[in-house]
């Protein structure tokens, strides 16, 4: 089998092999990455790329950070895995650090954002069912994961298609509309789940008065408030957690993506009274809280909680936002610019696929979500020079695109 596999590689490139051996669930860009360091990635041909996407905010402190690499190496030489039926020190140390920085209470470790949100949903359901309450208010345009439960909580029908029937009990309000939420609250409602910044939905920040209002509604109706900070948490907004920008404290907080510095680890943090809803056997995760992943997470928290880094996110993010707004004034193609810290989006009047592709060819990695929103999630330690480089590439791409469109229009007129 191994010999056959080697022989195949002589006749096919890796793009062909991927199509042959892997589920076709991703529309991959035509590039094969083999190395990463800091804010850069290199492909198999030696070409260097400035990464302003960070693996959907996973590599938020850069690729192969030396402190993360050291932590992984040191822990992997001691203990790679032990069942959660036993104690391990990295898991307990990461839990203590997370709780000291956030809500207090207790934490459940899993492997991904979807699992973290799944845990939050189960917590809300179990606590609510004691009073006959099992419905959760979520939001249109939200994204909470791809398990059946988290897909059911996701307010985008395009992700639902083909997977019906979904899990019962989710209602969808308009994001940033308290009136819309109030209409959906009933005696069966047990919780509200919201992203402080909708990422996959198009980089839409919540208004401060909206999250304050949600907290008030939850207090008045005895509901749990769940903040999904999978993408926007851990320094991305200039605060260690996005909720700190708003002065609103949730009952449950979910984290993942950047928590492991590139390794899979997620956390569901709940206040004590909520966490106590679970008893032995109510929930579990075989690999959740893996010692190596938690060792990496401990170092990540030390890095992203540094005040200098968080200040850099705020200042560099403001500068980046300003440069994007200048592009908006210069090119009619850019409809709107929005975001907080280093989680920014530029909404276009056209499909952004071509722009992403052209940036890739020029050595800049960005993403497009909702077909028309360019999404920027660079490492948190970038500087103004990096922003200028990225904006320069974007400017060239937009100029080329506008000239091409103008040429096509004039040709039609002729």
Image (cartoon, grey):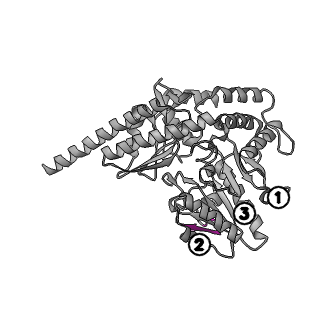
Magenta residues (range)? 165-173
Is 169 displayed left or right of 83 in the figure? left
Q: As drawn, which residue projects farthest toward the left?
A: 414
Is residue 301 visible to us here?
A: yes
Residue under pointer 2: 182
Report which quarter residue 206 is drawn in. bottom right
Query: What's the mark number on residue 124?
Result: 3
Report which quarter residue 357 is drawn in. top left
At label 3, counting other C-alpha atoms closer than 10 Å, the crowd grade (few under 14, some 14-19, many 20 or more) is many
Is 343 displayed left or right of 110 in the figure? left
Q: Please tell me how many numbered marks the rendered image carries.
A: 3
Mark 3–mark 1 Cα distance, whole angstroms, equals 12 Å
User: Of marks 2 and 3, which one's residue comes earlier in the chain?
Assistant: 3
Residue under pointer 1: 276
User: Of marks 1 and 2, which one's residue comes earlier in the chain?
Assistant: 2
Residue 8: horizontal and vertical position, in percent? 54, 30
Circles 2 and 3: CB atoms closer than 8 Å: no
Residue 139: horizontal and vertical position, in percent? 56, 63
User: Of marks 3 and 1, which one's residue comes earlier in the chain?
Assistant: 3
At label 2, counting other C-alpha atoms closer than 10 Å, the crowd grade (few under 14, some 14-19, many 20 or more) is few
The quadrant of the rendering that contains the N terminus is: top right
Q: Residue at x 62, y 49 (%)?
A: 230
Residue 394 or 156: which is nearer the viewer?
394
Q: Residue at x 69, y 67 (%)?
A: 219
At label 1, counting other C-alpha atoms closer than 10 Å, the crowd grade (few under 14, some 14-19, many 20 or more) is few
Secondary element at tag 2: helix
Mark 2–mark 3 Cα distance, whole angstroms, equals 19 Å
Secondary element at tag 1: loop
Secondary element at tag 3: helix
Residue 119: horizontal and vertical position, in percent? 72, 55
């Amino acid at each position: 089998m191994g010999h056959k596999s080697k022989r195949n590689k002589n006749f096919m490139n890796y793009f062909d092999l991927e199509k042959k051996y892997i589920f076709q669930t991703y529309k991959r860009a035509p590039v094969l990455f083999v190395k990463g360091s800091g804010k850069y990635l290199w492909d198999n041909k030696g070409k260097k790329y400035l990464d302003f996407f960070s693996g959907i905010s996973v590599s938020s402190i850069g690729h192969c950070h030396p402190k993360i690499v050291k932590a992984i190496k040191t822990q992997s030489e001691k203990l790679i895995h032990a069942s959660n039926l036993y104690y391990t020190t990295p898991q307990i140390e990461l839990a203590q650090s997370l709780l000291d920085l956030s809500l207090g209470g207790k934490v459940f470790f899993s492997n991904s954002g979807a699992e973290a949100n799944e845990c939050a949903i189960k917590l809300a359901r179990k606590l609510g069912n004691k009073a006959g309450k099992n419905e959760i208010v979520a939001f249109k345009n939200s994204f909470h994961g791809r398990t059946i439960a988290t897909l059911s909580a996701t307010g985008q029908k395009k992700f639902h298609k083909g997977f019906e029937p979904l899990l019962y009990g989710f209602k969808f309000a308009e994001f940033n509309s308290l009136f819309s939420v109030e209409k959906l609250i009933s005696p069966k409602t047990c919780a509200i789940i919201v992203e402080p910044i909708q990422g996959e939905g198009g980089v839409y920040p919540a208004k401060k008065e909206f999250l304050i209002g949600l907290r008030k509604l939850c207090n008045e109706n005895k509901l749990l408030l769940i903040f999904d900070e999978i993408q926007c948490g851990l320094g991305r907004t200039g605060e260690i957690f996005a909720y700190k920008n708003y002065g609103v404290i949730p009952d449950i907080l979910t984290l993942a993506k950047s928590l492991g510095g590139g390794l899979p680890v997620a956390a569901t943090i709940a206040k004590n009274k909520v966490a106590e809803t679970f008893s032995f056997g109510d929930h579990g995760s075989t690999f959740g809280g893996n010692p190596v992943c938690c060792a990496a997470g401990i170092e990540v928290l030390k890095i992203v909680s540094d005040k200098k880094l968080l200040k850099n996110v705020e200042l560099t993010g403001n500068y980046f936002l300003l440069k994007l707004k200048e592009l908006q004034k210069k090119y009619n193609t850019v409809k709107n610019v929005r975001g907080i810290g280093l989680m920014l989006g530029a909404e276009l009047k056209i499909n952004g696929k071509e722009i992403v592709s052209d940036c890739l060819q020029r050595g800049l990695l960005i993403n497009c979500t909702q077909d028309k929103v360019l999404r920027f999630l660079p490492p948190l330690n970038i500087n103004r020079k990096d922003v200028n480089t990225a904006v320069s590439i974007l400017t060239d791409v937009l100029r080329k695109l506008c000239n091409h469109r103008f040429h096509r229009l004039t040709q039609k007129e002729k």
